[in-house]
Amino acid sequence: MSSPKNKVRSILQSAFLRYLRRESNPDERNLIDQFYENVPQKLISDHDLRRIGSEMEQEIASQIQSQPQKAKRKYKLYIPTAACIALSFTFLTIYVLRYKGDDALPQQRSRTIVGATLRIGDDRFNIQDSLPKGGSLETSGGETVLNLANIQPQYLKDTITVSNPSNEICTVILQDGSVVKLAPMALVQYVSAVDGHERRVLAKGIASFAVKKLLRNGQRIPFIVETRLQTIEVLGTRFNVDATAEAEEHIHLEEGSVRLTHNLSKNEVLLVPGQEAFLATGESRIYVANNGHDGKVNAWRKGLFIFDEEKLEDVMHELANWYGHRIRVMGSAKDLPITGTVSRYQQIDDVLDIIEMTNKVHYYKKKGVIYVTAR
């Protein structure tokens, strides 16, 4: 076993031995008793876990052998229970070490939202004890949800703030029916009225949005999310925003599309499913990459473009997004493989010159459009 696993197992063994000697405090005894009562028996049948449990049982037995004879008889009654508890805790330790989550949102530790706070105008609500009229706590998909979709009209002109200072994920249904999941320490703030021309939400920290499409007089009502660096116009979609760090922000698009505007430079990009965008303090452009391309993102942070056997058409699409130019790749040139690392020069011509010199391609400009052809 690795050092962290050995350390955890050592801590658990100490807890079991204290329990066996009846030296544990009431909280420890209650924890172990409850855990043992609720562990499914099928978990104890795994061969590897039985072996680990057997090793721990032997260690417990060796401790008992060092006790006086009278104490041995008393402790023997607890060996099966202690061994099963040891085995169960070993399984729990292995499960946590092997399956620690790494998703866009942190793993939810609890299905409640005890730590979330709600403020409407000047009124504060303790969600577990009081809610605004029409608000409710509901269960959906096995988790508790704060539903604000039916709050009374008296709140429609007030600013609503939901913050999540806890270490749990908080799920909120907004007044328009959109769903927001707030990671620990995240916050959303909005005016709940939907009879206007747009819906606007301020977000801080990490938040996941599932936006409901709404129409007014046959026209779509925009849903806009603002962070410190970016303004996201949502076109009926699901996406995640990470506005935790001051130096960089990130948006990951799951479905639909969003129009992303840099708050400082006013540069815009349109994201489609399978893409994510990055913004940095001091950088006026928005970097767009396909999901999972960590190498490209790291290159962007270093001021580089990196291409690895990518089709010329995809390369030009990336350059078009970055520099804000219209680029058309003609004919057979679309599938030409491009490999290399290029600095993100201020002018697109510098990058195109390097690509032209190192590959069998040629580019020219006509009426504001850059055309790229095979040579």
Image (cartoon, helix red, strand yellow):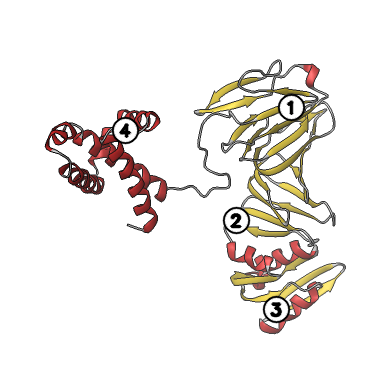
Q: Is residue 162 above or below residue 204?
A: above
Q: Quadrant of the N terminus?
A: bottom left
Residue at horizontal 69 percent and vertical 76 percent from the top = 342
Residues at marks 1 and 4, CA–CA distance in whole angstroms: 40 Å
Q: Position of residue 103 (x, y in %)?
A: 54, 48
Q: Which residue is mark 4?
A: 39
- Give the numbered dot on residue 355: 3
Q: Which residue is mark 1?
A: 119
Camera-side residue: 23 or 307? 23
Tag nearer the camera, 1 or 2: 1
Q: Position of residue 57 (x, y in %)?
A: 21, 43
Instruction: Tell me, yes or no, if residue 176 can be seen here.
Output: no
Camera-side residue: 362 or 253? 253
Q: Which residue is mark 2?
A: 291
Q: Is residue 295 above or below residue 131?
A: below
Tag nearer the camera, 4 or 3: 4
Q: Quadrant of the C terminus?
A: bottom right
Residue type (three-letter) at the residue carrying disc 4 = Val
Under tag 4, what secondary structure?
loop
Quarter assignment of residue 313 = bottom right
User: Does label 1 or label 4 sit earlier along the sequence?
Assistant: 4
